[in-house]
Amino acid sequence: MPDTTVSTRALVKRYRDVTAVDSLNLDVRRGEIYGFLGRNGAGKTTTIRMLLGLIRPSGGEVTVLGRRIVPGETGVFSRVGFLVETATAYPHLTVRENLDIQRRLTGSPPRSVAESIALLRLDPYADRRAGQLSLGNKQRLALARALLHSPELLVLDEPANGLDPAGIVQIRELLRSLADGRGVTVFMSSHILAEVAHLADRIGIVHDGRLIEESSRDELAAKARAFATDAYTPEEREQALLTLDLERYFLARTGDGPKGGAASTGGDS
Amino acid sequence: MFGQVLATEFMKLHRAKATWATLAVLALMPLGIALFMWIVREPGRAAQLGLLGTKASLAGLEATWPQYFYMLTLVFGVGGMLLLAFIVAYLFGREYRDATAKNMLALPVARHWFAVAKLLVAAAWWMALIVIVLVEAMAIGLAMGLPGFSAELAATGIANVLLAATISLLLAPVVAWIAVWSRGEVAPIAFSLVMLALGNLFGKTGWAEWFPYSIVPLLIGMVADPVGTLPAGSYVVLAATFAAGTGATILQLRFADNSQ
């Protein structure tokens, strides 16, 4: 069994004069959470579409779970769960019906629908039409669809889109437990550093279609700290820490986060 | 696996308003013809009903079964071609409108099965509509007590409607290809409208049997006197159009970038 689940070699995608992905070399190891970080338009979604065979590379190659991705060859995707860009579903069908379609097309057992509904806490919405769901619940539905067939690899494009802070923490914990407990490899893109920093084992930073940095989370955190020391005044660094504390405090007060001293001293409860 | 793909394509129609909308539109056609027949049966009604009555008179209609079948074939042939284009555009195009195409195409299913399953759903949908509305049309004709009915006439009339419906089906894969190529529903419907107009133009040039979109108008007598049987060349053209449309749709789904 190869140790690398996703690999790209000299991957290129050009749209006329624009090079969206430029000589990208990636290796995502089995069982790790790989954060693919970049600004909007950096080439993250284009890369993900190439990983899933949705668009053809202009050059280079993609290998997923040991199989080279060739347009139209979809067999390997029985082992891959994915969420590409916006969370979409058949709007006139219910959550359960949408998942049943996914179940049938992935050859999963009937119980997998109820399991994925429970896993993503969609029970109250199971018989609601997808078109009537909030953005956050649409995202949960898309994640339920991605997880339904117990994939070995999850390819997630901005998985926290539309989720509230409690939802973000839940998805973060879910992905971590899948990676640690079941050995699922997660390749997730984001443009939000905090989201990736909380979760990823390794982080690749893509800019203008090129991978400009690849580090473990700890290495990147150390680099960020060093950078912050040099680049910011003590007041600015204090402000950044305050933002992190506020996030923890908010989660604690809304019942989903760790209970800290600051949270328990709130006066209006 | 194909059975599951086909089942899910039918599941996607659950609660879809388009199925009822197409039934309503097609079911109105025999009612419209019957209204005209009812008007022309009594010359006094035409005068009383003003513009509608004048139209019915100008159409040179007689309230008889042969005329009723002729009109049915005409509206099913032309209106039906557009309605089927709408059905096919809906089945293929909505995957792009709802941005579900990307979910569908990265599943562990050979992509050509989606094209085949959607075309089969379109065929089933279309044929179900035709059968339902033919039954409705026969019931209306009998209820009106139109003169000139015979079993032979009914068999010929129904056969012509079914042949026009089948020809429309053979043209459907091209509409499917336009839908996946344009990633939507508007272009395939616009394409069908343009082809229908071109089909009428071509029909008047004497080359009707060689242009796929002139063949239904040729059959039903829109561009000349109705032909009893289509020339063999027309069947070849239709088969080639069907094969080209199906092949292009499959190749588009399999090899083209799906970046929507």
Image: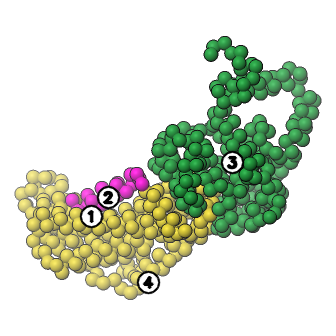
**Tag nearer the camera, 3 or 1:** 3
Marks 3 & 1, CB-CB < 8 Å contact: no
The chain letter corresponding to green is A
Residue B152: say if magenta.
Answer: no
Q: Colour of chain B?
A: yellow
The answer to whether residue B251 is left or right of residue A129 is right
Marks 4 & 2, CB-CB < 8 Å contact: no
> In what element is the residue under mark 2?
helix
Q: CA distance from mark 4 to mark 2?
A: 31 Å
For disc 3, the marked residue is A157
- Vertical position of residue A78 compared to residue A219: above or below: below
**Tag nearer the camera, 1 or 4:** 1
The answer to whether residue A28 is left or right of residue B135 is right
Badge 2 or badge 1: first in the primary sequence: 2
Looking at the rendering, the stretch of residues picked out in magenta corresponds to B14-31
Q: CA distance from mark 1 to mark 4?
A: 29 Å
- The percent position of residue A86, horizontal first and vertical second, equals 61, 46
In this view, which residue lies farthest toward the top?
A: A267
For disc 2, the marked residue is B23
Of A261 and B140, which appears nearest the observer? A261
**Tag nearer the camera, 2 or 3:** 3
Callouts 2 and 1 in the same chain: yes
Dot 4: chain letter: B
Residue B23: say if magenta.
Answer: yes
Dot 3: chain letter: A
Callouts 4 and 2 in the same chain: yes
> In what element is the residue under mark 4?
helix
Is any part of residue B249 visible from this angle?
no
